[in-house]
Amino acid sequence: MKTLAALLVAVVVTMAMSFPVAAQIGQGRLTGTVSDAQGAVLPGVTVSVTSPALIGAQSTVSEANGRFLFPSLPSGTYKVTFELAGFQRVIRENINIITGQTIPADVQLQLSGVSESVTVTGASPVVDVTTTKVGTDLKGEALTAVPNSTDAWGALSEAPGVRMQGFDVGGSHKSQQSGYEVFGIQNQSRIVTDGVDHTEGVGGTGYYEDYYSNEEVSISALGSDVEMNSGGAAVVSTIKSGGNQFKGLENFTYESGSWVGDNNTDALRARGFTGNPNLLFYEGHADLGGPIKREKAWFYVAANTFKIDKAVSGVPQNVATDIGLFHNYTGKGTYKPSAGDTVIGYVQRGRKEKPKRNLSTLVPAESVLAQDSLTYTYKGEWQRVFSSRTFFDVTVGNYHSLWPMVPQVSAATNPPFVYRSTGAIAGAGWNAFNSVRNNPQAKAQLTYYLPEKKGSHDFTFGFEFRHDYYQLGHNGNSGPIRYSAPTPGAAPDRIRFADVGANADFGTGWITSANLDQKYAGYLQDRWAPNSRLTITAGLRIDHQNVSYTDGLRKPLISDVLPDGTRIFPASTTVTGATLLKNTNAAPRLGFTYDLSGKGKTVLKGFYGR
């Protein structure tokens, strides 16, 4: 598939009372300038941060220009302490760090007097004045209290710049993916959960994660820096991490079909439309997080299950309905072996059951295919603070899925049928398949902060790869033949063959070719702040993609179904693997932000990217 380049130019004015602005895919950042009462910058100030989201405290020292930077902090509420001999200690509380955002925390220190310390409480800054992305962030009540589908598409529907192709009402879209676009861009999205990319295709998510296990969901729609590989939406969620205190969340949601309104019209009813209302919806979630050893090791575990039962237009409810059953189990551990090191492990297992998938007026209950699929997502991460200027992060993860489809009735006794005049089908479900996906990946990123007289430089260097392996093939459960008739009740006058294996594991000696999509990327970026109000971001990302398919061996069983044993195809066919595409693409990024008021409340942003 030929790589397409997209050029995006945007200028956005963001007010503090509107929405927060997302930054890169990684963790949040805290920066600021320390000065005295006369406005002169103060170097050598010890700046420390503590938070329920952070094991222990992190500290740095303000540079010669008074600036400080914490390049990677987990999402959470922080207390920031400023200390310098001869000055009052200042404590700023309730600073909210958000995934992918750079939060400012400027402060003035007064000379020591009667009071040794001053505690400042108030609203946390909400406008990111240093990065170019536009989006929104959901955490706390904004994440869990909105009565939507409690999934990635529910979060997308609440983000500015995102236009959905369908809207969830009271969980009506739960268990199904919805199309969307951001500022006119379709099918260029990236879905990342706790550092693991599980994007399916060009815009979908690989699995239905436990929405309530998220600490935060961040949506960015425009102005991505070099960590984002495309111009579309970045949906980045962060899993809860536990803490020094035991905490848990229990949630139960229930919706009866009698609570669902009916907006069908006589005109639609006359055409046979009966609606697709929820007949039943419930979701249960329970989690627990806390210390294994305070200030040293944390754990978090969660279990979630939900069921949705929907009517299908034109299908009597006493005949069949569309049922979805989902089960998720999540675990995460955080360990701090030393003051500068943090190790994180995460795993999530999901199961999806759709026993009547694709049920419709043309696909009766006997002809559907039943889905019972499993997904696994896991990662290991090492974070290292080398100094007050240097931070390093390495993540190794994988997304894996197993998806079999099985007919409701036996193809041997009820062979598949299709009626060409209406498109209706009968008999066993057709095209029963098995699919396997494996997506190992790794990412390493170094951040280096360099203050100078002409402004500070915030350098980012990174490398990542993904090897997306996908195998799809007929599993034989639909049989090797489907009959075709002109109208229902008529005798079949056409036959369609499929070269399938003899059993559900692709047949003895029958090997399906696998698709391989190998991606490598390196990137570098400088975020230069020549003064306290202007930030210029310049970066370059180079991606290499190698698309191929593996060897395969196909052994049709067509002779087994023809009465006279005639073989009209070869006994076996060898498929030789080949490379379809090798492509290297250089994508520059250039942007600026300007703090119009100088108070961090109004910012002008411009961005150009490829």
Image (cartoon, helix red, strand yellow):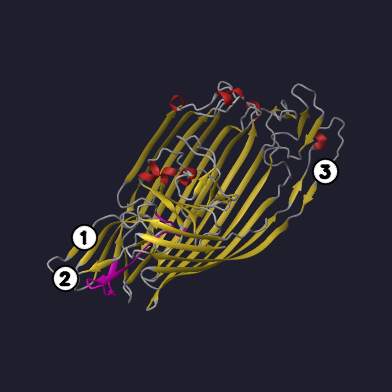
Looking at the picture, which amino acid does disc 2 mark? Ser
- Residue at mark 1 to residue at mark 2: CA–CA distance: 14 Å
Q: Nearer the viewer, residue 72 or 542?
A: 542
Residue 310: image x %, image y %? 53, 29
Q: Which residue is mark 2?
A: 112
Q: Nearer the viewer, residue 16 or 366?
A: 16
In terms of sequence position, does the residue under pointer 3 or pointer 1 come before the other? 1
Q: Secondary structure beneath disc 2?
A: loop
| Mark toward the viewer: 2 or 3 | 2
Residue 496: image x %, image y %? 78, 35
Residue in the image at 87% along x and 31% along y: 564
Residue in the image at 71% along x and 47% along y: 512
Q: Is residue 425 left or right of residue 195?
A: right
Looking at the picture, which amino acid does disc 3 mark? Ala
Q: Nearer the viewer, residue 242 or 51?
A: 51
Please say if 488 is above or below 190.
Answer: above
In terms of sequence position, does the residue under pointer 2 or pointer 3 come before the other? 2
- Please identify the quarter of the rendering in which residue 435 is found: top right
> Residue 420 — which label?
none
Asked whether disc 1 touches disc 2, contact meaning CB atoms under 8 Å apart, the reply is no
Q: Which residue is mark 3?
A: 571
Q: Is residue 218 left or right of residue 352?
A: left
Residue in the image at 26% along x and 75% along y: 40
Q: Which residue is mark 1?
A: 119
Residue 158: image x %, image y %? 44, 45
Give the extent of the magenta segment: 20-47
- Residue at mark 3 to residue at mark 1: CA–CA distance: 81 Å
